[in-house]
Image (cartoon, rainbow, N blue to C red):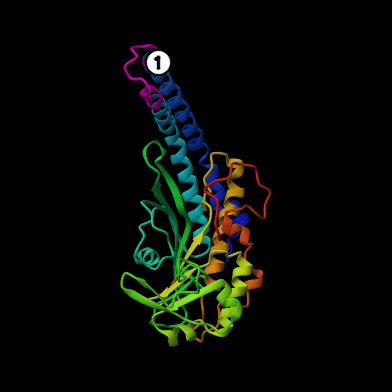
């Protein structure tokens, strides 16, 4: 499931992007004007701070840095708004060509609360969400969006925001009916004796106990741990051939941190990675490259969501096509498949897929 970017660029998307030249130029001009005026107003203020009465002491440094950052952010706003406009236009066109929908703004729902409750996501103090893709993939309803979670650490002057998760949340209707809650985690996350013993017999999330589901597959227990509130249904859901599929899936997609929650007839995935879907740019020459990159990223994530799903009879939907799965580099936010103009790496380093 990959958008034909060449066809899009030769059609309405290409025409629309050409019409945005004036908007881009105006945004650059407005930003330059703001920076110029900001610097002109800031210089006498800084001169007074540094060469005037010595009553502020070391606070002069903090005031100067804060003022400079403020001017920089104020000046950059027109460029940020222009990039967002281009990004929404490109991503919406890619989504429409695939029969799904795109929205820049996101309001997380019950799927995010479930991901938090059952440990798919770490604790955090600040959150941000964007880039929602939703609709149906091969007849299965899905919802996919980016999440950026940060935690406040340190004390005093060393207080800082640290990213604890950056990636996507994927919610998808599961093809096979089930009633239980089953958690697929990394082996070793829940261990006895301060992490030195074997897997815990059970784990509890807000009073909901999930028991360890022992599997006969030796390789599976080295990679994954399975917990459920229904041992029988969990073994039916994660059956022997599906175990083999999950192990192949991890290798095919480079899924070093693959974890999933099966609940309420849906599968919820938390996929760590870099900042994705950033197709907006001020350089029109990079439009095609950014569109290709975004199309590849969505294709990889859609492929992953389909690959972990099952048919009503329990067959993995992506089993037949998985060897041709999208390049796993796309899940890391890496650019592939087209010549790329060098640019600074965006987002935060990825810890998994």
- Whether residue 101 is visible to the viewer of this picture, yes or no, is yes
State the residue in front, 170 or 273: 273
**Is residue 50 covered in magenta?**
yes
Q: Assign the N terminus to one quadrant of the image.
A: bottom right
Residue under the point 66% across and 72% down: 323
Residue range corresponding to the magenta coloring: 49-63
Residue under pointer 1: 50
- Spot occupied by residue 8 in the image (x, y as percentages of width and height): 58, 55
Would you place residue 82 above or below residue 133 in this image? above
334 vs 3, nearest the viewer: 334
Residue 133 placement (x, y as % from top left):
46, 60
Side of 97 relative to 268 (left or right): right
Residue in view at x 40 percent, y 44 percent: 154
Which residue is found at the position 55% from the left and 83% from the top? Answer: 315
Q: Quadrant where the C terminus lies?
A: bottom right
- Identify the residue at the far top of this view: 52
| Relative vertical location of residue 290 with respect to residue 3 in this rendering, above or below | above
Few, some or many C-alpha atoms within 10 Å of disc 1 (few <14, some 14-19, many ≥20)?
A: some
Residue 265 percent across, percent down from the top left: 40, 77
In this rendering, is residue 257 above or below 274? below
């Amino acid at each position: 499931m990959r958008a034909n970017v060449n066809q899009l660029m030769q059609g309405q998307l290409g025409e629309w992007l050409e019409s945005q030249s004036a908007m881009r130029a105006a945004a650059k001009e407005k930003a330059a004007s703001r920076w110029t005026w900001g610097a002109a107003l800031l210089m006498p203020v800084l001169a007074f701070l540094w060469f005037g009465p010595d009553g502020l002491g070391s606070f002069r440094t903090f005031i100067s840095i804060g003022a400079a950052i403020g001017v920089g952010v104020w000046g950059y706003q027109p460029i940020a708004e222009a990039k967002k406009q281009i990004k929404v236009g490109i991503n919406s066109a890619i989504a429409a060509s695939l029969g799904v929908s795109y929205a820049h703004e996101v309001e997380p729902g019950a799927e995010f609360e479930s991901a938090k409750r059952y440990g798919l996501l770490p604790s955090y103090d600040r959150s941000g969400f964007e880039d929602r893709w939703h609709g149906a993939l091969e007849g299965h309803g899905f919802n996919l969006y980016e999440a950026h979670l940060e935690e406040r650490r340190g004390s005093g002057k060393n207080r800082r925001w640290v990213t604890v998760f950056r990636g996507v949340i994927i919610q998808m209707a599961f093809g096979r009916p089930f009633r239980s809650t089953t958690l697929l985690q990394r082996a070793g996350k829940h261990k006895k004796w301060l992490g030195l013993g074997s897997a815990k017999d059970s784990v509890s999330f807000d009073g909901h106990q999930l028991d360890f589901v022992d599997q006969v597959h030796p390789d599976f227990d080295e990679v994954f741990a399975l917990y459920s509130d229904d041992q029988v249904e969990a073994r039916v859901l994660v059956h022997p051939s599906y175990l083999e599929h999950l192990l192949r899936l991890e290798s095919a997609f480079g899924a070093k941190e693959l974890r999933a929650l099966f609940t309420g007839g849906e599968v919820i995935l938390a996929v760590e990675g870099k900042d994705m879907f950033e197709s907006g740019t001020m350089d029109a020459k990079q439009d095609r490259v950014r569109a290709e990159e975004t199309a590849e990223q969505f294709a990889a994530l859609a492929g992953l969501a389909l690959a972990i799903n099952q048919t009503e009879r329990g067959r993995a939907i992506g089993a037949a096509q998985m060897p041709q799965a999208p390049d796993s580099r796309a899940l890391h936010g890496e650019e592939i498949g087209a010549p790329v103009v060098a640019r600074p790496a965006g987002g935060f380093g990825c810890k998994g897929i």
